[in-house]
Image (cartoon, rainbow, N blue to C red):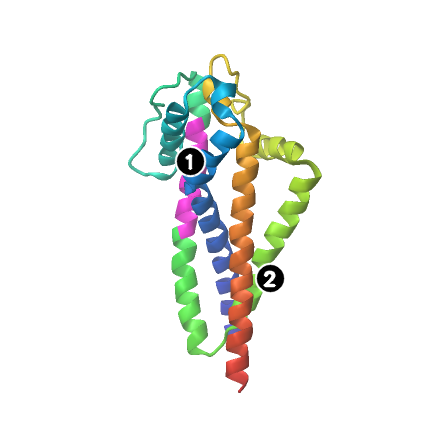
Amino acid sequence: MKKLLNILTSFSLAIFIICGSIIVGLKCKSLYYYDVKKLNISDASGFSDDEIKLNYDYLIDYNLNNKVEEFNLPTIKYSTQGKIHFEEVRNIFQIIKKVFYLTGLISILGIILNIKDKNIKFLNITSIITILLPVIVSILLIINFNYFFIKFHEAVFSNDYWIFDPYIDPVINILPEDIFFHIGILILAIVFLTSILLQVSYRRLNKKLKN
């Protein structure tokens, strides 16, 4: 029973960390603001920096905020297919949020029960699980980001609405592929650092318990 609790807590905590990293990575608008300048998105899209940030902020809020339900970009026109795609993306992030909260509750309960039994192995297992993700994904991204970016969309979405026509959905011009790459790197970095923190905590606590 203790072993099962340990494994359940570890996997729940790992999923909680991954989902949390995705949410934090998406909320980090300052990274996008930096890319607006670095990638010259204004020149490439034909929109001003302020207009780009306004519409990007809306996209992030639309995906993560429960109160924003109807898709309606502030100033950039969009097609019906574009709207459907963003609605599908929002559904995915809303699921991630629900999983984040659910695994958070399970993790808290599991941590309390494990600590009561003076069992901290879940920290080590969680650290191993979470460190494998950034390592494996980073290798794939380095090999061919564009290939896996396309395959990811083909696997997640049942239609091709994610393939935007910039003439009818100019919003794609403010979302170059590099943006997603940088956000992905940030998410992986958060997961990696959290994994290291868990491993350090495990070793220190384990040392104290042995003394």
Residue 96 in magenta? yes
Q: Position of residue 19 (x, y in %)?
A: 47, 49
Helix, strand or loop status at disc 1? helix
Q: Tell which circle, 2 or 1, labels the residue nearer the N-terminal end.
A: 1
Q: In which quarter of the image is residue 71?
A: top left
Q: What secondary structure prevails in the magenta region?
A: helix
Q: Position of residue 187 (x, y in %)?
A: 52, 46
Residue 7 appears in the picture as rendered: no
Picture disc at residue 128: 2
Question: Badge 1, how many Cα within 10 Å: few under 14, some, many 20+?
Answer: some
Name the residue nearer the viewer: 199 or 38.
38
- Across the whole image, how many numbered discs are drawn on residues? 2
Point out the frontmost of discs 2 and 1.
Answer: 2
User: At 47% across and 22% down in the image, what residue appears?
Assistant: 42
Q: Is residue 132 above or below residue 155?
A: below
Asked whether, in this view, residue 182 is left or right of residue 101, the answer is right
- In the image, the segment drawn in magenta is 86-100
Amino acid carrying mark 2 in the image: Ile
User: At 32% across and 31% down in the image, what residue appears?
Assistant: 69
Residue 126 in magenta? no
Q: Residue furthest toward the right?
A: 143
Picture disc at residue 91: 1
Helix, strand or loop status at disc 2? helix
User: At 64% across and 32% down in the image, what residue appears?
Assistant: 146
Q: Where is residue 87 in the image (x, y as percent from the top left)?
A: 41, 29
Q: How far apart are marks 2 and 1 (CA)?
A: 30 Å
User: At 63% across and 46% down in the image, what residue appears?
Assistant: 137
Amino acid carrying mark 1 in the image: Asn
Picture disc at residue 21: none
Name the residue nearer the viewer: 59 or 157.
59
Q: In this view, does 187 lie above or below 53?
A: below
